[in-house]
Structures are given as structure tokens and as C-alpha cells.
Image (cartoon, helix red, strand yellow):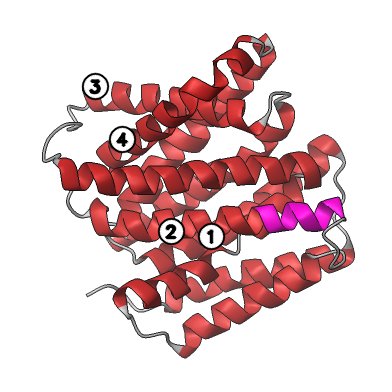
Amino acid sequence: MNRRRAIASMHVAALMFGLTGIFGKLTEAGPVAIVLGRAFFAALALLAFARIFSSPILRDMNLTRLMQLSACGLLLGVHWLSFFHAVKIAGVGIATLGFASFPAFVVILEWLMWRESTSRMDLLKVILICVGLVLVTPEFDLGNQTTAGLLWALLSGLCFAGASVGNRYTAGHLHPVQVACWQNLVILTCLLPFTLSAVGQMAPLDWLWIALLGLLCTGLAHGLFVASLQVLRARAASLFFALEPVYGILFAWYLFAEQPTLPMLFGGLLIVSALALVERAPKPA
């Protein structure tokens, strides 16, 4: 995969991820049941893809890599749980804007783990995101549901940043479909013992929304995201997901009448503006 194809893959993945909050809002089930169903359908899609295109699932796997994938899978699972909880209590727009903070966390984590130098451009991206989040916050009161939802969304962004940085370390050694499949299997294994009763009570329509969530927003989107990390640095790839709030807010506005406020729009604009800086990010060696 070359850089141009990696960037195109990131745009498609961002669109698919933008629909995540919409399907979560449409589903009446709780966050745990949603995450379990999402992981189940995503794993099915990835296993089918691997069989059709002869992609490896077990090749080059060992205990060390299994532990690495498990750690990233757990972070991904917590990211999903906190994100859908934010959607339920604060709405799609706030949840997606809070999650869009994760490029700032990526910059911090890459510096902590690899001591990679932080450029002025990186700092500018972080500042834009932080100012945008301040504007999005309705009031600094934990009793406010919107503020609480934003904090859950920030936790979601932190966990996704950790999974992204971890995937950068493993993606060069394993096939992207292999990475995504194993991480979804880890989530499925961890949640299954706690959600059997909740899954049995889910409405038929919920299964449809969760199936679309797993197949499109996870199987397809996650595979494209992991594949792009073979070419793009995590901090560069992550900035494309500043587009997710745009898609999420527009869809939520149209479907659920979640009209954004002026400060929210301005804050979202600052967060999304970080995307314009991605083309000026240094190319990988």
C-alpha cells in the first residue's frame, strides 16, 4: 500500500466510523450488548474475508504477539464501551467530538513510548483540539449529562489512541485483517460471559443495527485503518478521524434533530481543522 492509497483508505474508514454513533443511537440495547454484537459480526466478516482472499489468521502468531493483540483488543473494547455510553447520555454529536480528541493523546503516547520528537505542527494540532473541546463543553459541571458524556468520550479517545499506537507496533509484522480479527475475538471472549442474558432480550431491529455496525463500521473500517498504519504514522492517520464528528453531527442533526449550538459548531470546526495539517505531517522514512 502506497501513501496515496493509505490516505484514501483513511477517508473511507472515517466515513464508516462516522456512522458508529448513529447505529448506537438507533439501538435500544445497552453499551455492553452493543459492543458484544459489534465484535461478533465484525469477527464473522473478517474471518469470511480471510477465507475468501486467503489472508492469514494463524500465521506468525506466537504468545508474545497474542499478548500484544489482546492488550490492544482490551483497549479497543473499553473505547467502544465508553463511546456508546457517551452516545446514550449526551448524544451523537458530543460523543463523536469528544472521541475526536484522540490525535492529541496519540502525540503524547508516542512521545512517552518511543520518545519521538514533537514538532510545532504537532503542538498546534493538540492546541486546536484542546480549545475546540473547551468550546464544546456546555459547562464544567459533572452533574451535567452533556459534560459527563464528553468525559466518557474523552476516555474513549484515550483508549483508542492507545490501541492505535499499539497497532503501529504490531501491524508491520501481521496482516491487517489478522490484527483486526484477533482484537475483535478478544473483545467477544471477554464480554460473552457477562452479556448472554442481555443479548437474549434484544429486539430484532437491534440485531439489524448492530449487524451493520459490525460489518461496516468495524469489519471494513477497522481493517482499512490498521492497513493504513503500515504506511502512515499513527499521529498522521489519526487526524483523518477528525472527520468523524462532521459525519456524526450531520447525520444526528438530520435523523434525531440533535441541532448543534454555535459554540459547539465553532469548537468542532477547530477540531476538524487539525485535519488540514495532516498533509504537512512528515512522511515516514
Check disc 4: other Cα within 10 Å, few if <14, some if 14-19, many if 20+.
Answer: many
Q: Which residue does the numbered mark 3 point to in the structure image?
A: 52
Q: Which residues are magenta?
A: 144-152
**Dividing the picture into quarters, in which one does residue 265 lie?**
bottom right
Q: Nearer the viewer, residue 279 or 95?
A: 95
Give x and y (percent) for residue 261.
88, 60
In the rendered image, residue 93 lying in the magenta stretch gets the answer: no
Farthest left residue?
60
Check disc 1: other Cα within 10 Å, few if <14, some if 14-19, many if 20+.
Answer: many
Tag shown at residue 110: none
Kind of residue indicated by mark 4? Trp
Please tell me which residue is depicted at 35% across the width and 48% down the height of the picture.
71
**Dividing the picture into quarters, in which one does residue 281 lie?**
bottom left
Tag shown at residue 162: 2
Give x and y (percent) for residue 146.
82, 54
Q: Secondary structure at mark 1?
A: helix
How far is mark 2 from mark 1, CA to CA?
A: 6 Å
Q: Which is more N-terminal, label 4 or label 2?
A: 2
Q: Which is more N-terminal, label 3 or label 4?
A: 3
How far is mark 1 from mark 3, CA to CA?
A: 34 Å
Is residue 5 visible in the rendered structure shown here?
A: no
Q: Which residue does the numbered mark 1 point to in the structure image?
A: 158
Q: Secondary structure at mark 2?
A: helix
Kind of residue indicated by mark 3? Ile
In the rendered image, residue 151 lying in the magenta stretch gets the answer: yes
Q: Nearer the viewer, residue 231 or 40?
A: 40
Asked whether the beta carbons under mark 2 and mark 1 sit within 8 Å of each other, the answer is yes
How far is mark 4 from mark 1, CA to CA?
A: 21 Å
Q: Which residue does the numbered mark 4 point to in the structure image?
A: 182
